[in-house]
Image (cartoon, rainbow, N blue to C red):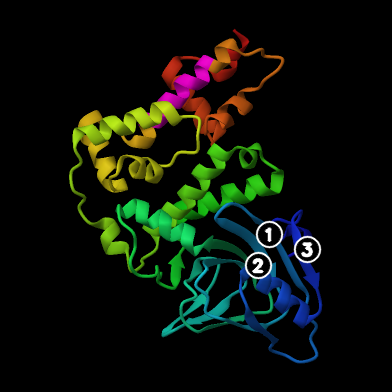
Amino acid sequence: MAEQSLPLAAHLRLHTHDVDEARARVGNELGDHGLRPVSSGIHLDARLNGMTFDGVGLYSLRYGTEVLITPQPVDSYLLVEIPLAGAAEVSHGRDRIVSTPELASVLSLTRPMSMRWAPGHESMIVRFDRAVLEAHLGKLLGRTPRRPLTFSLGLDLTRPPARSWLSVVELLRREAETGGAMLEQPVALGQLEGLLMTQLLLAQPSNYSEALSAVQPRVAPTAVERAVDVIEARAAEPLSVEELAEAVGVGTRALQEGFRRQLETTPMSYLREVRLERVRAELRVCDPGATTVTDVAYRWGFVHLGRFALAYRRRFGESPSETLRR
């Protein structure tokens, strides 16, 4: 793969031919590890690009030759390694896979492991802060997880749930590569990170999959009413369904079931409708020469502008730009 085609090229963290420097610098971002070229006499050509956000880091990495990597167990984060080209043999405890562009590896990093990257191997790596991810899991469950979160090793990227997760990764990558306005909007970025964590927890088998799929208890109507009040008051803030459930003292999936039963919608659909109304109200009083639809949409948490415009037209019978011009 050409140098400039490695994702996140504008966010270079490292380019070196020195094994010790590569081990140390990549270790600062992705955890301490052993690094050894398999063939002596072949020079390393290590390149690491990356960006970090609140609880998530996004990186691209290659070594330019066949290498053996032995990560040290760590309890501060988890990694998802998505091959872009080539293959990697991955051993994690008793589990072993050959990771390819169709099969990512989810590294819980709680057990000894090793990876052998083929000469042409290049990857995108998503780093999750373990404390943030487990707190997000707790919001989905409605209780604090008592055991460390561990995933199955292989993530089948051909399955619909995994493809949905990968599409969120790609959206974050595009925003990072283009300097997208979404990254400057806390509401939009918070929603994107939350979606990235939720989709991974639902798509990949883990020691909490059974709990996540369990039947949820019914919530009292007052909990739904309180959630509606929170949405109305905090529509401009970063607000996920997990945070909403926490604010009213119930589990995420129980709150979702309460909204479906009582309001025939979901918490996030209700929030979207409130935000659409707020966007329309703002567009109707803004100066078209001093603001843009994009700015207003991002300010109210709409991260997919195409979907936003479609939802707006369906709701109000005109485009957002038409409202702004009037």
Q: Position of residue 114 (x, y in %)?
A: 55, 83
Toward the bottom, the furthest residue is: 40
The amino acid marked with disc number 3 is Glu
At numbered mark 2, what does the secondary structure look like: helix, strand or loop?
Answer: helix
Spatial CA distance of label 3 from label 2 is 21 Å
Q: Above or below — where is 192 with respect to 94?
A: above
* Residue at point 22%, 32% (across, down): 222
> Could you tell whether 1 is left or right of 273 in the image?
right
* Residue at point 67%, 48% (across, down): 176
- Dot 2: within a 10 Å radius of its alpha carbon, few (fewer than 14), some, or many (20 or more) residues? some
Q: Is the N terminus in the top left, top right, bottom left or bottom right quadrant?
A: bottom right
Q: Check residue 271 for magenta coloring.
A: yes
Q: Which image quadrant for residue 266?
A: top left
Q: Above or below — where is 321 with respect to 209?
A: above
Q: Main secondary structure of the magenta part?
A: helix
Q: Is the C terminus in the top left, top right, bottom left or bottom right quadrant?
A: top right
Q: Which image quadrant for residue 240?
A: top left
Q: How many marks?
A: 3
For residue 50, the mark is 1
Q: Position of residue 70 (x, y in %)?
A: 59, 83
The amino acid marked with disc number 2 is Glu
Q: Which residue is mark 2?
A: 29
Magenta residues, as a range? 270-281
Q: Check residue 248 for magenta coloring.
A: no
